[in-house]
Amino acid sequence: MADLLDRFAPLMAQRDALFNENGADPFQVKMDEVLSQTEAVIEGRRTILVGTNNYLGLTFAPEALDAAHAALDAYGTGTTGSRVANGTYGGHKELEQALCDFYGMKHAMVFSTGFLANLGILSTLMGPEDYILMDADCHASIYDGVRGSQAQIIRFKHNDAADLDKRLARLAGKPGNKLIVVEGIYSMLGDRAPLKEIVAVKKKYENVFLLSDEAHSLGVLGKYGRGLPEEVGCEEDVDFIVGTFSKSVGTVGGFCVSNHPQFDTLRLVCRAYVFTASLPPSVVASATVNLGLVQKGGALRKRLMRNAKKLQTGLSALGLQVASEDSPVVAVVAPDPQTAAVFWRGLIEAGVYVNLALPPATPFGYSLLRASLCAAHTEEQIDDVIAIFADVASRLGLIAPAEPQRTAVG
Amino acid sequence: MSAHKPGEPSPETMAALIEIIGPFNKTGAELKPETRFSEDLNFDSLVVMEFIAVVEDHFDISVPLNILPDIATLNHMGLAIEKIVSDDAS
């Protein structure tokens, strides 16, 4: 009889082949000390963090720390209950109101993580007669969410509004509502949805709704940080925004906001909302404070994008293939998973942490060294990161050595 | 369409399907109605998605993800395609 987990043997063999020698394993990184938003101690080394999605660097915002400490002392370490039982405190309602004010929307629901927000909303929103049309490159939480839905699930080609149009045309005349699902910024390469084109397609048809997952664009895009819809000026055409507090907001938790008049119905039927414990009061307090900092964070956004541009330009100039542009994500394409793994290890041993992202989690089957910038990175840190990339990449033969080697004389 | 047995897709559908699978057939398995995607062709989830995208383009249809768990063989795929094509036409 096969063991319970034998079916994962090929995956484990693949992992062992990539990380069989002693040394750092990207799936088992341990931060022994966190020195700041941009530095930690890993394996005894001071390491520059360039892969934390901590876009605005708010994890140590003094105002949020104060609010979290106060909430911790006043309300304890956890609510030990669901939002619909004993787990809704005043702070949870204040956070939902803060989200309504931030987005200018009528309704907001706070979930315990961003993953749960997608799981809950996408599995519940559409019924058996309905259709969900999702971008093929959507996040795992969206795939898992729609899998729990009774609707028909149709994928359209990544960022291809014409392909979406074709698929909606095939459904025209069929009963049932349609929900388009996109992301403001796609996490792996940091590219944006063509939201204006998507909205134009949406408007051609009846009974079509639009949901945008703003996980990576909240706080990053738009004058006030409201993400891609604000940036491109089509906020009123996005019916549902899902987001997370675990990136630019600097803590953990998820949410959905909407103007749908019956939105609050979802509080009773979203299983990922009903059947899980609510966020701890200290997390709620820090999220509320940081949301305000996100709104006022125009200067942070400028620094973030300047930092990203500097890293993207620097790595491209080395001759590396950078698959990101105009994005807080800077993804370097390695030729294959094996090279990517060795590259990643070279970086970590030299004191740079980025994400290693391998297929099938990546588009185009790319093997990626995925960096994400922070507003708190200094120019010196980015220069160091570029120099370390240069060193590791040239040792791997991916680029020519940066400077001519000194030749021995005589 | 030419006559074919009930429970089987038309020879035209099957021929088109076999042509589409060609580049995806890394195991060199014989392509017939009972050929299985997972066991015979070694398709993993990623290949399935790429393959479905080509099927969708070729037949000008959308294949809902919901039906994928029920599609184990070329025969199942062919029948599913024909059902979607006829639903779209109605």
Image (tube, rainbow, N blue to C red):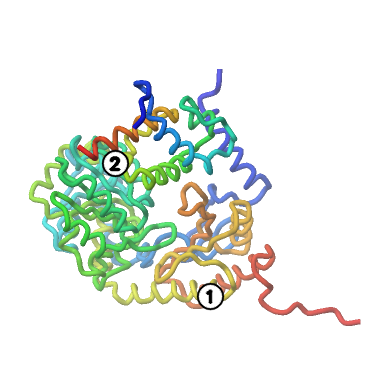
Residue A370 versus residue A384: which sits nearer the camera?
A370
Q: Which mark is residue A153?
A: 2
* Residue A260 percent location from the top left of the image: 11, 51
Q: Is residue A65 visible?
A: no
The number of callouts visible is 2
Q: Which residue is denoted by mark 1 in the rendering? A: A314
* Residue A41 percent location from the top left of the image: 54, 60
Q: Which quadrant of the structure image shows residue A116?
A: top left
Q: Amino acid at mark 2?
A: Ile
Left or right of residue B24: residue A295: left
* Residue B40 percent location from the top left of the image: 54, 29
Quadrant housing the N terminus of chain A: top right
**Image: A261 above or below A407:** above
* Residue A144 percent location from the top left of the image: 34, 41
For label 1, the SS is helix
Q: Is residue A262 visible?
A: yes
Residue A317 versus residue B3: which sits nearer the camera?
B3
Left or right of residue A165: residue A269: left
Report the residue at 12% width, 47% height from top. Answer: A263
Left or right of residue A386: residue A378: left
